[in-house]
Image (tube, rainbow, N blue to C red):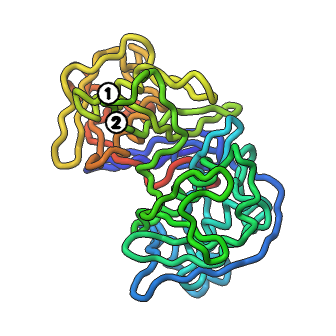
C-alpha cells in the first residue's frame, strides 16, 4: 500500500507497498467476493451534517461530461478484522452518496455480506452480523446515535469489544463525530447486548481504546493509555495496526510512546518491531506549535550506508505521535542534525505530517 506523506514546505511523498491495494499506509488491491445487501438511509439532526473529509471536495469536483464517464468517489475508512483478530483501518474509495448518508454508507461496510462486501480487501472481514441494518443515524453535539436492527445482537460473545471498537472508530473518522451511542430498534443501549460491555450515558469514543494490550505494565495504577501503531504483514505487504497500551508517562506522553515503540511490538497478534537494537532518544522530545522534534542516535538508520529510516519505522512514528493530543507533525534529527533520509533517499528536512488516509485500498 502507499501512504501519502505531507511535509511543511515542499511535499514529500513516500510510497509504502502494503498489503491492501493502495493503503495510505499499506495495502493491496485484492478483494473478496461480492455480496449485495439492502440499502438503508440515515438522517442527521437539523442544522448538522456529517462533513466530508478534505480530499472529498477534490474528488467531488467533476464536470457533467466526467460524471457521465465516471462516478465521483470519496475515501472512507472501515475498521475491519484481520487474520490475527485485530481491528484494523482500511481505506477504500466509495461512490459519494446522495444527501447526507456518508456515515450510514461507511457503517454498511462493517456488515458481513453487506452492500460493500465485494470491495473489502482479501484477508479482512466485516464484524457486524449478517443481516444487520442501519435504521438511522442522528447527530447532536458531536455524538452520533446509531440505530441498528435487532440482527445487530446476533454475534459471538468473544467478538463484542471488537464490534464496538469497529463501529466507534469507523464513525469517528468524520470531523464532527466525537462519540458514539447505540440503539437497537430505537431503544438506547447502556451496554452491549450480549456480554454487557459498557457504553455509558455519554457513549464511546476513541479515547476508550482499540486492540487493547496491557504490555509489560504489571500495575496499571499511575499509567496512561496511549495508542501506538505497529506494522503487520500479509505476504510481501504491510499494513498498520493501532494498539492501545498502558505506558508510564513520568517523562511525558510523547517520550513514553516512543519508548513503547523501541521496546518492540506485543508478542501476540502478528505485530512487528519497527526499530533495531540500540535506538535511543538523545534528549527529551521538544514540542512547539504542534510539531514534535525528535533527536535520535545513529541506530535509527536502517543501514549506515543509506543513512535512511525504514518505511515501517517512519510510518509507525508519525502515526503513533500524531495520534497524541496536540501533535500535528514530526521532525526527526540524528545527533542534532537534519541528516536523516526518507526511504526514497531524500533528506527529511521538513516535519512530516500524518497521511490523509491509512491502509488505503486501490488508491
* Image spot of residue 302 (x, y percent): 44, 20
Tell how many labels.
2
Q: Quadrant of the N terminus?
A: top right
Q: Residue at x 62, y 77 (%)?
A: 186
Quick check: can you spot residue 206?
A: yes
* Image spot of residue 127 (x, y percent): 70, 53
Task: Point out the tag, 2 or 1, that comes first from the N-terminus.
Answer: 2
Quick check: can you spot residue 118?
A: no
* Left or right of 339, for residue 261: right
Using a 10 Å C-alpha cutoff, classify the residue at mark 1 as few (fewer than 14 neighbours), some (14 to 19) or many (20 or more).
many
Element at badge 1?
Answer: loop
Using a 10 Å C-alpha cutoff, classify the residue at mark 2 as few (fewer than 14 neighbours), some (14 to 19) or many (20 or more).
some
**Looking at the image, residue 154 lies above or below residue 216:** below
Element at badge 2?
Answer: strand
Question: Which image quarter: residue 268?
Answer: top right
* Image spot of residue 25 (x, y percent): 52, 44
Q: Residue at x 41, y 82 (%)?
A: 48
Question: Which image quarter: residue 72?
Answer: bottom right
Could you say which disc has been placed on residue 224 in the image? Answer: 2
**Looking at the image, residue 20 lies above or below residue 238:** below
Q: Kindly indicate whether the residue at mark 1 contacts the one at mark 2 (C-beta within 8 angstroms).
A: yes
* Left or right of 145, for residue 346: left
Q: Quadrant of the C terminus?
A: bottom right
Q: Residue at x 22, y 35 (%)?
A: 293
Kindly report the distance in space between the C-alpha atoms of the residues bearing marks 2 and 1: 6 Å
* Left or right of 309, for residue 331: left
Name the residue that disc number 1 marks: 248
Q: Residue at x 51, y 32 (%)?
A: 213
* Image spot of residue 159 (x, y percent): 68, 46
**Looking at the image, residue 52 lies above or below residue 230:** below
Amino acid at each position: 500500500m502507499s501512504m501519502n506523506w505531507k511535509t511543511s514546505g515542499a511535499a514529500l511523498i513516500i510510497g509504502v507497498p502494503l498489503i491492501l491495494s493502495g493503503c495510505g499506509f499499506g495495502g493491496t488491491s485484492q478483494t473478496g467476493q461480492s455480496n449485495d445487501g439492502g440499502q438503508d438511509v440515515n438522517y442527521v439532526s437539523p442544522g448538522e451534517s456529517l462533513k466530508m473529509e478534505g480530499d472529498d471536495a477534490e474528488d467531488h469536483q467533476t464536470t457533467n461530461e466526467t460524471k457521465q464517464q465516471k462516478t465521483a468517489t470519496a475515501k472512507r475508512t472501515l475498521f475491519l478484522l484481520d487474520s490475527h483478530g485485530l481491528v484494523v483501518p482500511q481505506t477504500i474509495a466509495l461512490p459519494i452518496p446522495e444527501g447526507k448518508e456518508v456515515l450510514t454508507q461507511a457503517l454498511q461496510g462493517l456488515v458481513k455480506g453487506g452492500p460493500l462486501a465485494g470491495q473489502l480487501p482479501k484477508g479482512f472481514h466485516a464484524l457486524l452480523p449478517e443481516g444487520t441494518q442501519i435504521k438511522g443515524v442522528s447527530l447532536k453535539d458531536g455524538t452520533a446515535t446509531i440505530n441498528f436492527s435487532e440482527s445487530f445482537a446476533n454475534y459471538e460473545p468473544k467478538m463484542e469489544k471488537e464490534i464496538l471498537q469497529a463501529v466507534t472508530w469507523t464513525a469517528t473518522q468524520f470531523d464532527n463525530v466525537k462519540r458514539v451511542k447505540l440503539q437497537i430498534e430505537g431503544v438506547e443501549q447502556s451496554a452491549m447486548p450480549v456480554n454487557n460491555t459498557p457504553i455509558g450515558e455519554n457513549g464511546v469514543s476513541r479515547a476508550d481504546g482499540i486492540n487493547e494490550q496491557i504490555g509489560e505494565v504489571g500495575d496499571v495504577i499511575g499509567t496512561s493509555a496511549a495508542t501506538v501503531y505497529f506494522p503487520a504483514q500479509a505476504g510481501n505487504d504491510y499494513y498498520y495496526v493501532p494498539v492501545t497500551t498502558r505506558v508510564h508517562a513520568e517523562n511525558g506522553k510523547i517520550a513514553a510512546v516512543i519508548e513503547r515503540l523501541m521496546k518492540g511490538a506485543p508478542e501476540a497478534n502478528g505485530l512487528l518491531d519497527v526499530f533495531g537494537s540500540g535506538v535511543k532518544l538523545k534528549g527529551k522530545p521538544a514540542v512547539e506549535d504542534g510539531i514534535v522534534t525528535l533527536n535520535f542516535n545513529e541506530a535509527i538508520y536502517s543501514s549506515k550506508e543509506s543513512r535512511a529510516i525504514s518505511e515501517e519505522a517512519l510510518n509507525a512514528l508519525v502515526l503513533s505521535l500524531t495520534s497524541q493530543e496536540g501533535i500535528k507533525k514530526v521532525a526527526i534529527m540524528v545527533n542534532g542534525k537534519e541528516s536523516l533520509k526518507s526511504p526514497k533517499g531524500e533528506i527529511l528536512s521538513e516535519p512530516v505530517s500524518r497521511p490523509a488516509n491509512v491502509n488505503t485500498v486501490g488508491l
